[in-house]
Every structure is written in C-alpha cells, then in structure tokens.
C-alpha cells in the first residue's frame, strides 16, 4: 500500500530550476534509497515535499500522504504531518540540536507537540527513547547538553527525537556522513533494528552505495535534478544499466583481489543555470552520442522491472565491486 506518492515534483530558486519532475513512491514499511553526487537534488526533493524550503523556492507538482495533498495545503495541515507521520533526521546533528537546552528537554518538546504527553510521563518516555537508541545510562544523561555527547551519540539523540512522534516514515538525510566508519556501522545497524521493530517506512538519502545496499529494498539514482534509474536493490547492484550508476560503482574500491586504480567519473554535476540541451550526463558520459547531446531521455519502464532514462544503457553484466560493497556496509 502506497504511503507517500510524489508526482512531477519541480523546484526552482529565483527562477532557476533544480528539480525537473520527480516521480517516486514509498509504501508502508519499505525502505527506499536515494543516491547520487552532492548537488543532484536528493535532499531538496524531501525538503520540498515537507514544506521546509525557504520562501524564495517555487514548488509545483503533487505530494500526497495516503491521499492527503501537501503541496499548497494549509500550514496547519502540513505541520500535522511533519514530525508526526513523517520525521526527518539530518547529516550534522550538532547543527540540529539546540546547544543551550538539554537533550531531554528537546525530546520532551516533540513528545508534547505530537503525542500530548506531559509531566512524568513525558520525561519517562524521553528516557525510554534514549535507551532505545542506545544511549547508556539514559536516566542520568537525559539532563545533559548536546556538547556532552559524542558525534555518534548526538545522532542517536536526533533519531530519538524523530521517533518521539511515532512516525510512519523516517527520512534519513545522510545520517552517517559526519561520523567515522565504526560509528557509521552502528547507526546503520540501529536504523535497521528500529525499522524492523516499529514497522515504519524509511527513505535513506546518501552518496554511499554500501550504506544504501545494507538498508534499502529499492533505490532511486538521481542526477542533476532527475531520477535516471530506479528499481529493486539486488538487480540494481548486480547489473547497473545507466552509465552514471555504473560510474558510481566503478569508483568504489575493491575489498578483495588486486588493488587497481579507481575509475572516476570525469567532470562535475552541471550548473542548474546552464543545463545541457539533451541528457544532463552526456558531457561526462563515455557512451554519449550526438543524439544524446540534443535529446533528453525520459524515465521509462524496462523489461527487467526497473525504470531507466538512457539511450545507450550499459550491457547486462554483474558488478562485482557493487555486490561486494553491498555485503559490507561500513
């Protein structure tokens, strides 16, 4: 059953378009990945969906939560969904937590707003949430300030705050980027455990294909404000079809065998103010033809069950590096 449906979502800042018609869905209980380089529009997609972009942003399209339209809805209607039915955690917890308030007080604010708890019940629930996300001695540390926690523990506090509203969907926006490899693995394991225990759906936004492979069931690959490939995680990791997806895998170091030089994707994501006429990836693509530079490919269903936007897809072949990376998330 579809929980969130996004259709033809477009975003522009001061007239410059940065999203060009995003279509994606999230079903109840499933985990969906959103991957791509920085600047591809991954975070903007969900910030726009939840009404969190600044006033200079122009947003159009449709975002529905079980039939309830969010785009253009009254502020009270959006706020009833945001934090309650859909919660979001960000990549830098230190900038998301208020440094002059205890973590317990900040969690209690969410509990009062979304669940109407007060007094001892609210504090007891804050302690329970901190304990659930793995904060040791939660009953004492609930009264500490953010600077008294490590980076990984602050991210756990942010997850506890997100869970305070008992959301149906948790959006994790690169939650492990600011953490070292060991703590990254712990946070990924925590998110997987919480999803299994609560039954909530999850959107995992990341540039780390290994992390996405460890958590998600489906994945959407974004480039320059568009989804260029989407499908189930296993076939996507074994046989990427879009040259950009293949390039992401080629840039992953092998954990076995000889140490060969990595194959980078040359160039950078195009400036939104100067987008190519045809395929946005054509200037960086080794398979691009003259037709690619003049005509933009649409995202279309393929016979293997995935969606693809490419005139010259990669031939079917297993990506050993991708499969190895999927098995080892950290």
Image (spheres, grey):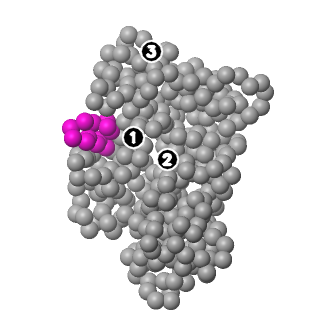
Q: Which residue is mark 1?
A: 41
Residue 190 x/y as whole percent: 63, 60
Question: Looking at the image, is mark 3 or mark 1 nearer the viewer?
Answer: 1
Does residue 81 appear to the left or right of 242 in the view shown?
Answer: left
Does residue 18 appear to the left or right of 201 in the view shown?
Answer: left
Q: Which residue is rendered at x = 51% and y = 83% of the image? A: 123
Classify mark 3: helix, strand or loop.
Answer: loop
Q: Is there any visible trace of residue 138 in the rendered image?
A: yes
Q: Is residue 14 magenta?
A: yes
Vertical comparison of 232 with 157: above or below: above
Residue 261 x/y as whole percent: 67, 22
Residue 326 figure quarter:
top right
Q: Is residue 43 magenta?
A: no
Q: Which residue is rendered at x = 52% and y = 68% of the image? A: 146
Q: Is there any visible trace of residue 63 in the rendered image?
A: no
Q: Which mark is residue 205?
A: 2
Vertical comparison of 188 with 145: above or below: above
Contact, mark 2 vs mark 3 (Cβ under 8 Å): no
Residue lying farthest right? Answer: 257
Q: Which residues are magenta?
A: 9-21
Q: CA distance from mark 2 to mark 3?
A: 28 Å
Q: Which residue is mark 3?
A: 288
Q: Which residue is rendered at x = 22% and y = 63% of the image? A: 74
């Amino acid at each position: 059953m579809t929980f969130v449906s996004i259709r033809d979502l477009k975003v522009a800042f001061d007239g410059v378009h940065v999203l060009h018609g995003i279509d994606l869905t999230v079903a109840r209980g499933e985990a969906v990945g959103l991957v791509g380089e920085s600047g591809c529009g991954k975070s903007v997609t969900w910030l726009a969906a939840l009404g969190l972009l600044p006033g200079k942003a122009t947003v159009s399209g449709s975002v529905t939560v079980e039939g309830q339209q969010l785009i253009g809805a009254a502020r009270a209607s959006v706020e009833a969904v945001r934090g309650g039915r859909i919660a979001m955690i960000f990549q830098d917890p230190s900038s998301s937590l208020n440094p002059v308030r205890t973590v317990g007080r900040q969690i209690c604010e969410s509990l009062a707003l979304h669940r109407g708890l007060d007094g001892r019940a609210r504090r007891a629930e804050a302690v329970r949430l901190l304990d659930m996300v793995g904060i040791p001695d939660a009953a004492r540390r609930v009264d500490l300030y953010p600077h008294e926690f490590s980076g990984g523990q602050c991210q756990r506090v942010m997850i506890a705050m997100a869970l305070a509203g008992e959301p149906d969907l948790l959006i994790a926006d690169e939650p492990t980027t600011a953490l070292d490899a060991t703590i990254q693995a712990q946070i990924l394991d925590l998110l997987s455990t919480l999803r299994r225990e609560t039954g909530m759906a999850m959107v995992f936004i990341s540039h780390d294909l290994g992390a996405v492979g460890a958590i998600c069931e489906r994945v959407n690959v974004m480039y320059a404000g568009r989804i260029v490939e989407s499908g189930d995680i296993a076939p996507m990791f074994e046989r990427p079809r879009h040259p950009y997806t293949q390039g992401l895998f080629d840039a992953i170091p092998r954990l076995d065998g000889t140490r060969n030089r990595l194959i980078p994707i040359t160039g950078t994501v195009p400036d939104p103010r100067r987008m190519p006429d045809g395929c946005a990836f054509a200037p960086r693509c080794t398979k691009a033809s003259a037709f690619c530079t003049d005509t933009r490919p649409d995202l279309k269903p393929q016979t293997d069950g995935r969606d693809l936007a490419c005139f010259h897809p990669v031939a079917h072949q297993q990506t050993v590096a991708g499969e190895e990376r999927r098995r080892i998330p950290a």
